[in-house]
Each structure stands twice: as structure tokens, then as C-alpha cells.
Amino acid sequence: MQGVYPSDEDLEGVRDFLDRIVPALAEIEERLPPEAAP
Amino acid sequence: MTLDPYNAFLHREEENGDRRVGVKDVIDVARMPTTAASKVLYRVPERDAECVARLRAAGAAIVGKLNTHEFAFGALTNSPHFGPALNPWDPERTTGGSSGGSGAAVAAGLVDVALGTDTAGSIRIPAALCGVTGHRPTVGLVPTGGVVPVAWTLDAVGPLARTAAECRRALELMAGEALPPERPVRRIGLVTRLFEDADPAVAAACAEAAQALGGDVEPVELPLHEEISTITQLVMLPEAASVHLGWLRTRLSDYGPDVRARALAGLLLPSTAYVTGRRGRNWVRSLWERELAGFDLLVAPAMPIVAPRLDAVPADYRLLIMPYNSPASLLGLPVTVVPCGFVDGLPVGLALTGQRGEDATVLAAAQRFQSATDWHERRPVDAASGDVLYTTDTVP
């Protein structure tokens, strides 16, 4: 992780975020119009 | 020196002068420590941040550094290292955040103007919950040099004060130029979804206030409202992880648990997530600009709830408030929050959002609202003595 060493407890704290964001991210990726550039 | 019963200050030096300015402790003030309410950062800069230097050059007395959520990366101002800022309307309740010390200091009359920063609501939330006026400027209007970033492409520095007129004066000084003329406000879009999702009493106070703005108030549904909160996170979390990467490598255990989790989430997201966030922002912008072009202002409750008790913050607080704050953050739009009523003795804020660069338009609308109402003149009462904390006479 780029030189960062979180504990298991730290990773547990992140899970809430990722459990919510990752599915929403996948949905947005599917819906993004191809002409939308960064 | 007057007391600071609300833990608004992290560092305090003087209180002289009639232009007392407090500065959120993520913004450098020469020879005062910058800690960002963290255990990780401690620096005593030689120079003011550019925005502070401009205020000082205009005669402001910089009276100290104000409490913040750790690294301005959260919406409660409850740093585990420095303790929570307390809401002057009820010290058992949160100020919101992250510029909670700024909101408390203005509400309690400890400063005339407070500087805050706003990445995803951090000026607007404490302005609403503390019953003061706050302005999130168009991104880029106020220089961010000498300010600890949260997320570079979302961050904005702005003022909190009693009135929109005071916010405008401070904003023009920080921007280094007068704002361009405002546009006449004829059509006002009432963002129906944000009224429907708010506490009914909060929504009612805001709906009544919207009628006092003048102009034709029309309901409006804005596109992608559901997605905007996620897209904002996809931009903010990786940028914040990049800001903190060096400290995450060496000081991880010194972060409070909530900020540590957010920073790690940004680190764990794949690089394509950030690209998706940037693409999503442009997608939202293209659709919103079309809708916004038909309106001179958008209005909505600044927050869906009044200040929660510190020991009873809803578990879904972040999810609850993100739709209210993410759109203007993502698109870099100017927003002024004005006090517009009370629910159970606690202040309610109305958010006026303008098109990009239309800071003068939203501030002028806020000034007109405050000329016609007196919500901004209400003062908290001291919990112990029952006395009004200060009177209008003490605020120049």
C-alpha cells in the first residue's frame, strides 16, 4: 500500500467506506457517457 | 481576555480592535502555530497565508486560530486531540464542521469575522448549525497558498460573519478585488428534493424564507443528484490521500480514527476511481449548466437537520448531509448560507447557490434577505446565566 502499513483494525474502519463507494463507483462507470473526459 | 467556553480557539493572542478576525487552524498566520487540530502537524510559519495577509493589510486584527475537524476532513469539529467545538446555542450540541470553531466564535461574538475552508460543506454546515452567515466562494476566487489542503480541486477559503455584508467585505479583501456587478435575480429554483428529504420543520422554515427573496420561486429537479455525492467522494478521497501520503507512511497511528479511515479509503481506491470521479464531474457539469442557465439562484436548506447533540449524532450523519453540500463543492459554485429561522430553539440556515463566478449575486440576495428579516440578529443565550451572550452594539 505505497509504504503505508494499516493494522487490521484500521482496515476494518475503511470497510464501511469501500462497501458503499465501490458498488456506486461501478454503477457510475457504466453510466458515464463516453464523451465525458477527465 | 474573554473566556472561550465553546472551545472555539486552539490558539489565542489578542482581542483588540474593531475588526477581530479569527482564522481556522488550517490557514497559516505568521508566528502562530498551525496544527489543523491534529497531532501530526505543528508548524509556526514566518508568513501569513495570502488571504490572511490581505486582511491584515486592510487593518484586521488577527486574534487567533480556530478549532476545526482534524485536518478539516470531516463535518463535526470533534478532534480527539483538542476536543469538540461547542455550539453557543446549546453547548451540548455540535457546531458542525469542519470550520466549527469559526461558526462558534462568530455566534458567541468572540470575533467579528472568521475564516473557514470548505471542501464538501465545511463553511456552510457550521454557518447553518451556529446561526451565522457563511460564504463558500467560487473555487479559485480566494488564493489557497498557505492553507493545508483537503482536496485541491474542491477547496475554497471563505468568511463567516454575522451578516452577508460583512462576508462580502472580507471576501473582496481576500480576493484582492471588488466583485463584478451582480445579476438581477428574477428566477429562483427551489431544489425540491432537498426540501423533501429535510426535517419537515427545517424545510418549512426554509420554504417560508425563500418567499422573502423576491423573484419568481419555482420548483426544480436537478439531474444526477443521487450520483453527485459519490462522484464528489471519488475526487476528494484520492486527492486527500495524496495530501497525506507522507504522514500516512510515518504517523498513521497519530490520526484520529475517522480521518485515518477516510485517508486510507482514498489510498485503497483504484487509480481509475479518481479518473471516473473527474469524468463524472464533467458529466454533472454539462447537465447542471444547462439547468442552471434558467435560474439566477437556487435555494435549499443548508442542512436537513438542526445541530445534533454531541452524544447523539446520527449514525448516517455524513450520508444525510452529503446531498446538501456536494453539488456546489463538485462544481465549484458560490453559496451563501443565511440564518432563516429556528426549530426547537436551534438555528436553521438557507443556502443560496449561484452560477460559477456569481458570488456577488448570491451575496446581494443574502443582503436583501437580511434587510427584510432579523434572523441574523438573534443571539444565543448563556446556558448558565440566561443572559444574551452579547448585543448587536458590541459588533461593529
Image (cartoon, rainbow, N blue to C red):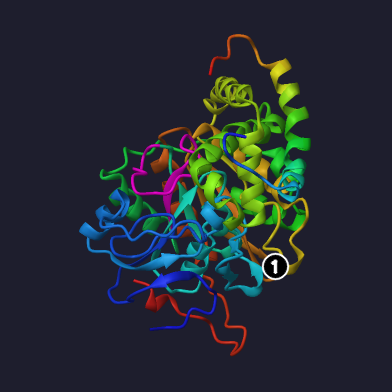
Q: Is residue B173 magenta?
A: no
Q: Is residue B364 visible?
A: yes
In magenta segment, residue B144: yes
The type of residue carrying mark 1 is: Leu
Q: Nearer the viewer, residue B365 or B87?
A: B87
Give the quadrant of the N terminus of chain B.
bottom left
Residue at (52% x, 68% y) in the render: B104
Q: Position of residue B137 (x, y in %)?
A: 43, 43
| Residue B221 appears in the rendering | no
Location of residue B234 (image quadrant):
top right
Q: Decide: is B77 above or below B140.
A: below
Magenta residue span? B140-160
Q: Main secondary structure of the magenta part?
A: loop
Q: Is residue B31 above or below residue B322?
A: below
Q: Secondary structure at mark 1?
A: helix
State which quadrant residue B78 falls in.
bottom right
In this view, B103 is above or below A12: below
The percent coordinates of residue A4 (x first, y second) are 60, 41
**Residue in view at x 56 percent, y 20 percent:** B286
Q: How many numbered tags mark residues here?
A: 1
Residue B13: give x, y in percent of width and height.
34, 74
Residue A2 falls in image quadrant:
top right
In which chain is the residue bearing label 1?
A: B
Tell me what residue is drawn at x 78 percent, y 36 percent: A19
Read off the residue under disc 1. B310
Is residue B334 toward the left or the right of residue B252 in the image? left
Label 1 crowd bin: few (<14), some (14–19), many (20+), radius 10 Å: some
Q: In which quadrant of the rendered image does the C terminus of chain B lie?
A: bottom left
Residue pictured at 54% horizontal, 52% vertical: B251
